[in-house]
Image (cartoon, helix red, strand yellow):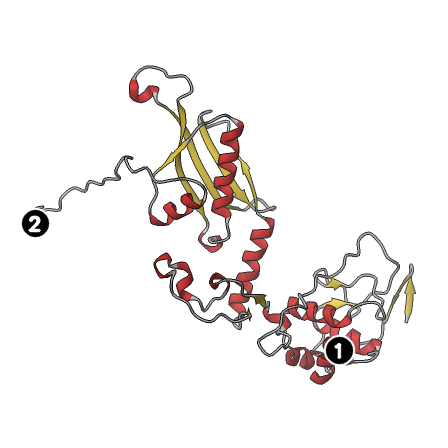
Amino acid sequence: MTVDHGTVTDAEPNTDPRAPDPGATDPGATDLGATDLGATDLGATLRALRRAADLSQRELAERSGVPQTTVARIECGRSVGPSFRTVERLVVAVGGRVTIAPPSERHRPLPTVSEQLRDAAGRHCPAHLDAREVREPKDWPGAWWAHFPALSGYASALPAVTYRLDRAHRDRDRARARVRRECQVRRHLDPTLPATSWRFVAELPDGELIGELRAHERSDELLLGFPLPGRCHLALDGVLVAPAYRLLGIGRRLVAALTAEMARCDMPSAHAVADEAGVGLLRRCGFRVESGGAAVMRFELPVSGEPRLRW
């Protein structure tokens, strides 16, 4: 045991050749911060670390050299006073680092998995599989009918909880959850565009653009030939969201930012031409279909030799 500036660490070498060296400096390692094994929920913390490393109990046991039954007892709270060496081997095996130090500002509690979720038999769900509660059909990947409005009357029994077994799907879901949590929507003012152009962007903190809405102001003066005060409207040019991040509510947030800016600028209405998916999005955001509105039409030049259609 060594003491350095109020921090007590165990500097003994790791006997497991498959586990990282606990004395090595890893910039990506997880610092557990001020840890009091008597006051900390060690089982929940270990489950959270195992989830972050995407390891099952069996895989963690193989990496750390600790029996899988011991891992299960610790996570369930049935292990009485596990040794420091056992805890260290488990934490190091998932890429963490055990530090015993006075409390400080930089130490933040490690996020833990919800302990309330149970399967139909009342058992804990595997911590590394990101279990989540099923409240409606859209929460369950097996509910293939949930995204088809025409099948709204179809019903099937839903499980209490669900999770992904495939690692690629879990990584994708975690990336989408991060985007949903960190995405920011703002109006982008571009000095190179006309003042009548409206642009809203959805981006991540690092500046990555994942969504965009464009619109422009339209005055009835262009159609009638004479000005009418207060008859300026918005024409919605389009709402685009990166395919990997659709169905996260980003499009609705962009439209909500547009309507909030319309209220601030006293803009009375906005018009849009949309396809089937776009119609559903805009209707959920408060747009309505105009029965006497303009028709969407298309013209294609005939191909030489192709018979002409007769109606």
Q: Is residue 14 above or below residue 5?
A: below
- Residue 228 x/y as whole percent: 37, 17
Q: Earlier in the sequence, mark 1 or mark 2?
A: 1
Q: Residue drawn 38% across and 65% down?
A: 154
- Identify the residue under disc 2: 307
- Residue 179 x/y as whole percent: 56, 52
Q: In this view, does 303 lie above or below 192?
A: below
Task: Single out the mark in the foreground, 1 or 2.
Answer: 1
- Residue 286 x/y as whole percent: 44, 41
Q: In this view, does 211 lie above or below 38?
A: above
Density class for disc 1 (Cα within 10 Å; few <14, some 14-19, many ≥20) is many
Density class for disc 2 (Cα within 10 Å; few <14, some 14-19, many ≥20) is few
Q: Distance between the residues labelled 1 and 2?
A: 76 Å
Q: Nearer the viewer, residue 153 or 196?
A: 153
- Identify the residue under disc 1: 74
- Residue 281 x/y as whole percent: 42, 47
For numbered disc 2, what is the local secondary structure?
loop
Q: Which amino acid does label 2 sit on?
A: Pro
